[in-house]
Image (cartoon, rainbow, N blue to C red):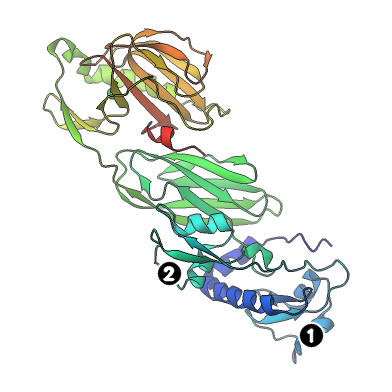
């Protein structure tokens, strides 16, 4: 029996969750006691729901008799949850030695950091961080606050860690891309749901991540991230819920005056048909990630924004009927347009509203679009490298002057492309 390899019963995790704070406190007590234990081999175990002396004896390769003797137990049928048991001296190589308990660290909270983020980073749980720092159940952390970080919980027998979840940025922002990361103690199968969308998790180096595009029109507020976690080895399952906050994107409203000779381009039937064509391309998901590191800009030289991403729009003084799904740069006609990242050309054709258009597929649901070009220099299926010229900027389609419209989509949801020039995903 390989004692070092614990099987984790997720059903027990659920009961653990109910006991959360109490266990966290017990954990702290245990850590303290273990630290003072004179012999390095001695192990303290905190009795868990469902434990019996027999199951504990099996787990640590010892006997009920030895446990009874070591703990002066009067009635072996009566042990209680939370009780601390000394695990008697191990048979050779049979008990996982408790790691030397390292000293607690102090972490100054930085802007954007949350308890789940810090729990993820330090291999702790939110409960433990709250307990150690005497934070109330609803208290948040604030920048500059000093948090005590206990040693990683996984070093202590009897308190199996839950998978840790972290989202970035936190809180989420309208029109931005968010990454959800999950880390467990072994291989996991994950199903996730956030903002009515399924999450597609990618495994990299024992960590799992998924991208979510937060719509510009998503109402600010609190949403629930639901994760169904299956431990691959045992098949055990747990459903976890994490609150995710979405805040205002800070968008402005703008009235666009369309010249008389282009009024026909606002015909709803035409707008809808072209939308459907473009959305069908954006809905494709290729399975190879072609992006790596920060995105570049689609133009060289000085950038002049003429219309930012997310701006609410009315046309010719009408109602606010739409928002700006991309970021516009004022440019001279004929300025080379560059691929901001490696990608495969998914669309390269003239459209009526968007003018000469190119869409690049960067893989795993991430795409970028470039509208109103005067010339297209690429073909569908072609792979272009970061910085490669894909066409020339212009004034074709529903456009009131030479400019480049650059947009990005994450699983079809328009997101702010500038975020990808500042934040690396995943
Ligand atoms: Zn635009």
Residue 187 percent location from the top left of the image: 67, 48
Q: Are marks 2 and 1 in contact (CB under 8 Å)?
A: no
Q: Is 42 displayed left or right of 35 in the figure?
A: right
| Distance between the alpha carbons at the discs numbered 2 and 1 | 37 Å
Horizontal side of residue 19 vs 5, given as left or right: left
Residue 101 position in % (x across, y down): 67, 69
Q: Secondary structure at mark 1?
A: helix
Q: Is residue 412 visible?
A: no
The residue positioned 34% from the left and 17% from the top of the image is: 371
Quarter assignment of residue 326? top left
Q: Is residue 273 above or below residue 168?
A: above
Q: Residue at x 70, y 55 (%)?
A: 234
Q: Quadrant of the N terminus?
A: bottom right
Residue 222, relative to residue 54: is it above or below? above
In primary-sequence order, the first of circles 2 and 1 is 1
Q: Which residue is tagged 1? A: 70
Quarter of the render that holds ligand 1: top left
Q: Label 1: few (<14), some or many (≥20) within 10 Å?
A: some
Mark yes or no: residue 243 visible.
yes
| Front-lying residue, 418 or 219 | 418
Q: Secondary structure at mark 2?
A: loop
Q: Nearer the viewer, residue 251 or 336?
A: 336
Dot 2 corresponds to which residue? Answer: 137
């Amino acid at each position: 029996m390989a004692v070092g390899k614990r099987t984790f019963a997720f059903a027990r995790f659920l009961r653990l969750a109910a006991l959360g704070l109490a266990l966290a406190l017990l954990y702290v007590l245990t850590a303290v006691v273990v630290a003072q234990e004179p012999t390095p081999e001695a192990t303290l175990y905190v009795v868990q729901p469902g434990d019996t002396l027999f199951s504990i004896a099996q787990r640590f390769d010892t006997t009920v008799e030895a446990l009874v003797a070591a703990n002066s137990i009067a009635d072996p049928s009566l042990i209680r949850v939370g009780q601390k048991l000394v695990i008697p001296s191990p048979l050779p190589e049979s008990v996982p030695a408790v790691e030397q308990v390292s000293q607690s660290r102090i972490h100054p909270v930085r802007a954007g950091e949350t308890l789940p983020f810090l729990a993820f980073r330090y291999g702790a749980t939110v409960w433990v961080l709250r307990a150690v720092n005497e934070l109330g159940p609803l208290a948040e952390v604030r920048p500059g606050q000093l948090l005590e970080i206990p040693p990683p919980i996984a070093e202590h027998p009897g308190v199996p860690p839950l998978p840790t979840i972290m989202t970035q940025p936190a809180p989420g922002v309208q029109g931005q891309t968010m990454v959800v990361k999950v880390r467990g103690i072994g291989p996991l199968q994950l199903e996730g749901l956030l903002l009515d969308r399924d999450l597609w998790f990618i495994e990299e180096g024992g960590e799992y991540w998924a991208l979510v595009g937060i719509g510009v029109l998503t109402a600010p507020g609190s949403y629930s991230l639901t994760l169904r976690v299956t431990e691959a080895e045992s098949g055990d399952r747990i459903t976890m819920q994490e609150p995710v906050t979405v805040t205002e994107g800070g968008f402005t409203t703008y009235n666009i005056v369309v010249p008389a000779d282009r009024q026909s381009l606002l015909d709803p039937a035409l707008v809808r048909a072209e939308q459907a064509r473009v959305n069908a391309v954006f809905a494709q998901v290729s399975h190879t990630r072609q992006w790596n590191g920060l995105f570049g800009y689609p133009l060289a030289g000085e950038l002049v924004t003429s219309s930012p991403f997310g701006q609410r729009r009315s046309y010719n003084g009408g109602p606010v009927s739409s928002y700006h799904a991309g970021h516009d740069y004022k440019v001279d006609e004929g300025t080379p347009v560059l691929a901001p990242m490696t990608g495969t050309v998914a669309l390269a054709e003239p459209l009526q509203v968007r003018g000469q258009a190119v869409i690049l597929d960067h893989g795993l649901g991430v795409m970028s679009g470039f509208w109103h070009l005067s010339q297209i220099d690429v073909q569908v299926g072609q792979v272009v490298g970061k910085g490669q010229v894909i066409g020339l900027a212009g004034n074709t389609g529903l456009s009131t002057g030479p400019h480049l419209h650059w947009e990005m989509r994450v699983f079809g949801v328009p997101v702010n492309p500038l975020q990808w020039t500042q934040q690396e995903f995943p």
